[in-house]
Image (cartoon, grey):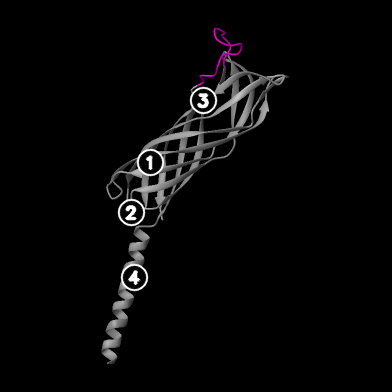
Amino acid sequence: MKKLVLALSLAAVGFTATQAMADEATSPWLVRVRAVNISPANQSDPIGGAGAADRVSLSTKTIPEVDFSYFVTPNWSAELILTYPQKHDVKLDGNTIGSLKHLPPTLTAQYHFAPEAKINPYLGAGVNYTRISDVNLPTGLSLDNNSFGFALQAGVDFKIDKNWSVNVDVKKVQIRSDLSLNGAKVSNVKVDPLLVGVGVGYRF
């Protein structure tokens, strides 16, 4: 009887350890750190209407980014993309006229095509909220503080081992704001940046 109890106990310990290892291998959390180049589309409406030449644009910039992914299933995940407020030069026909900061957290739903393979491509779509702050423009000019828009995403993870991976990611994000002069709208500023990122990921 004691031998049976001992055998069952060892079996239970072995099952628990095996299950714990399996749970660890399939943790739903993935954290990535990326270097991201922000390249605004800069297709703002010309100030003064059709035929006018004056257009507002933002400078290109490379930033650090952290994102957190939660896997609902092996193929489907949700990703929250975070960074700190980014400062950009504001230009008018190529000449710097001021600056602003924006904080653009983005939430996407992703589908991973080969979650168990060494090379795992994915596609994503979601929403972006951008908070515009610290606007420094000539007297009379102002920008709306908030922007809601869509986000599209494509990327690939190259697995190094069960925890570590190298990531390449491309996103197109809709960011827009109204430019006003003395309270009257003079342009719809279309930032709509392309974000190209390279980084590393860790699966817990």
The residue located at (53%, 25%) in the rendering is 191
The residue located at (45%, 45%) in the rendering is 79
| Residue 58 visible here | no
**Numbered badge on residue 17:** 4
Task: Name the residue tied to disc 2.
Answer: 162
Task: Name the residue tied to disc 3.
Answer: 60
Q: Choose between 126 and 162: the one closer to the eye.
A: 126
Residue type of the residue flagged with mark 3: Thr
**Numbered badge on residue 68:** none
Precedes in sequence: disc 4 or disc 1: 4
- 195 lies above or below 59: below
Q: CA distance from mark 4 to mark 3?
A: 50 Å
- 52 lies above or below 85: above
Asked if residue 48 lies in the magenta stretch, the reply is yes
Residues under numbered marks 2 and 3 in contact, where contact means CB atoms less than 8 Å apart = no
Residue type of the residue flagged with mark 1: Asn
Tell which residue pokes out farthest to the top in this image: 51
Task: Name the residue tied to disc 1.
Answer: 167
The residue located at (57%, 22%) in the rendering is 189
Residue type of the residue flagged with mark 2: Lys
Q: Main secondary structure of the magenta part?
A: loop
Q: CA distance from mark 2 to mark 3?
A: 35 Å
Precedes in sequence: disc 2 or disc 1: 2
- State the extent of the magenta-drawn residues as a range: 42-55
Asked if residue 74 lies in the magenta stretch, the reply is no
Q: CA distance from mark 4 to mark 1?
A: 31 Å
- 174 lies above or below 119: above
